[in-house]
Image (tube, helix red, strand yellow):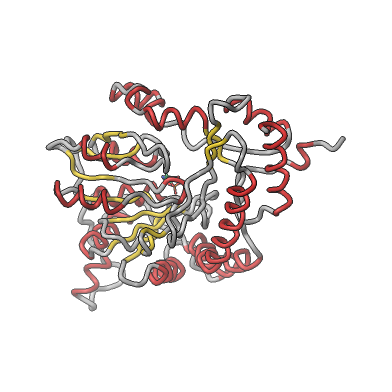
Amino acid sequence: MTDPAAHFLPFARPDISEAEVCAVIDALRSGWVTTGPKARAFEEAFSHFLGGAVQAIAVNSATAGLHLALEALGIGPGDEVIAPTLTFTATVEVVRYLGADPVLVDVDPLTLNIDPAKIRAAVTPRTKAIMPVHYGGLSCNMDAILTIAREHGLKVVEDAAHALPTTYQGQLVGQLASDVTVFSFYANKTITTGEGGMAVTRNPQLADRMRVMRLHGMSRDAFDRFTSKTPAWYYEVVAPGFKYNLTDIAAALGLVQLQRLPQFLQRRQHLATRYQKQLAGLPLVLPADAPAGDVHAWHLYVVRLTSSARMGRDELIQALSDRGIGTSVHYVPLHRHPYWRDRYGLSPEQFPHADAAYQSMVSLPLFTAMQDSDQDRVIATLHELLA
Ligand SMILES: *Cc1c(COP(=O)(O)O)cnc(C)c1O
């Protein structure tokens, strides 16, 4: 018998080609390793990718970008920010950084995206912002969310960590009418810089504030615009900022990954389509496709066991692992984590759809460097275990 560990198929793996290796080596040899020309070029390429009407602010994580976005929007103590419970803790930990309170709501059972009706019901006089998360790479119902925001004078910050590239009614996420949209370049995301992120906005005031706060609250860039005779050593600190800038080493990697994004998307779409076809008929709820004409980024491929399945979620994950197949769970909903549960007195009954999804869900391997034959093995194993 072959040792399954020798053939272990991970749930995700970054796709780094020789081009990225060369680009990083160039950055290292250039003598400029921190934020500089490569980071600037990455921002410009990213803005161009989104049609050029947005400013892009490169940061060292999406978490940093989300923090900067809420800070620039003036979110502070006493404010409430509405977000889904079925997300990574980073979405809302940044709300707490600013002393404000996240208000978690349930998701739509079909898409697993935040349910606009639940947002509407959660609005109070303290509500300042909504943070939709495009779960798995499928866009939220942005019309409904932006309508609620307009009606109540709320800001919208999109957590687009899964949504590169995702479209909503033909427009890319990042081009929509929200205030700020934040992408992640973490190792398992659709493109990676190791660690990194990008905040994009059409609002120049927000862009300026995020740029200043990204680097210690130093106003050098803004100051330069007024007095070009200022000596190079001079800067002014205008706020206690953060250290959130992206290095040129990471940006060099990101520039190549962004060029490869169209091929990455094609590969993800190919793999997702095969899963959709070949897992049909098993006791699984398969992920919702994007509406006709729209793009699903397929960052994740999340299936849910139906109640007629012959095994539960934990047993399935173990059986797959025993057969050399890695999976994950996205996510243990926030209402089940001790910090969020205890601080806000949350219980599963308040979030029936997210909680039921959590208890039955498995994220299957989906990454661009995965071979069709790897996927065939996942599909065959699921048939063996569940059919
Ligand atoms: C990955 C992720 C983040 C955080 O991204 P980082 O770049 O690691 O900070 C935030 N929200 C969601 C939904 C994510 O999946």
Picture coordinates of residue 148 (x, y %)? 20, 47
- Can see residue 221? yes
Residue at 40% x, 48% y is: 134
Residue at 29% x, 61% y is: 201
Picture coordinates of residue 103 (x, y %)? 26, 34
In the image: residue 257, left or right of residue 294: right
Residue at 32% x, 25% y is: 350
Pick the quarter of the image with the C terminus: top right
- Which is nearer the eye, 243 or 12? 12
Pick the quarter of the image with the N terminus: top right
Q: Residue furthest right?
A: 1
In the image: residue 205, left or right of residue 135: left
Picture coordinates of residue 331 (x, y %)? 47, 35
Residue at 23% x, 65% y is: 204
- Can see residue 241? no
- Residue 213: image quadrant is bottom left
- Which is nearer the eye, 25 or 145? 145
In the image: residue 386, left or right of residue 129: right
Residue 336's place in the image compared with 96, above or below, is above
- Which is nearer the eye, 45 or 384? 384
**Number of numbered labels in the structure image:** 0
